[in-house]
């Protein structure tokens, strides 16, 4: 098992009802796998998870990024500007 810390920002924090959560995961879980786990634990994130921006250890990450033990995963809602 490995442990990762997930940080929720902006309206994701409100939807999750928490600023952060620590999860024990199987080895070699990807960002996509983490999103599935988060959907089970936080159903209110359903509409947001497909488009969230993800950073792993302060570097942008994609769905195929493999997480490592002790990783810090930050989730940001997509931003729009004008």
Image (cartoon, rainbow, N blue to C red):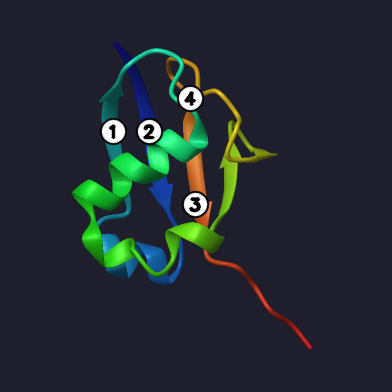
Depth check, front residue: 82 or 45: 45
Vertical comparison of 57 with 45: above or below: above
**Quadrant of the drawing holding the N terminus:** top left
Depth check, front residue: 36 or 45: 36
Label 3 sits on residue: 75
Q: State how far apart marks 1 and 3 are (Cα).
A: 13 Å
**Residue at the image position 44 percent from the left and 66 percent from the top:** 48
Q: State how far apart marks 2 and 1 are (Cα).
A: 4 Å
45 relative to 51 in the view: left or right: left
Where is residue 41? Give x, y as percent: 20, 48
Which disc number belongs to residue 22? 1
**Residue at the image position 63 percent from the left and 37 percent from the top:** 58
| Quarter assignment of residue 5 | top left
Mark 4 vs 1, N-terminal side: 1
Q: State how far apart marks 4 and 3 are (Cα).
A: 13 Å
Mark 2 vs 3, N-terminal side: 2
Q: Residues within 10 Å of mark 4 (few under 14, many from 20)?
A: some
Vertical comparison of 70 with 14: above or below: above
Where is residue 34? Give x, y as percent: 40, 37
Query: Most extreme residue toward the bottom, as rendered?
Result: 82
Q: Residues within 10 Å of mark 2 (few under 14, many from 20)?
A: some
Label 4 sits on residue: 71
Q: Tag 1's secondary structure?
A: strand
State if disc 4 and disc 2 touch (CB < 8 Å).
yes
State if disc 1 and disc 4 touch (CB < 8 Å).
no
Where is residue 66? Give x, y as percent: 55, 23
């Amino acid at each position: 098992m490995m442990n990762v810390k997930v940080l929720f920002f902006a309206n994701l924090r409100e939807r999750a009802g928490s600023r952060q959560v620590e999860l024990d995961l199987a080895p070699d879980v990807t960002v996509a796998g983490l999103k599935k786990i988060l959907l089970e634990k936080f159903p209110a994130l359903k509409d947001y998870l497909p488009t969230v921006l993800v950073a792993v250890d302060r570097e942008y990450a994609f769905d195929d990024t493999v997480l490592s033990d002790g990783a810090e995963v930050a989730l940001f809602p997509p931003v729009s500007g004008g």
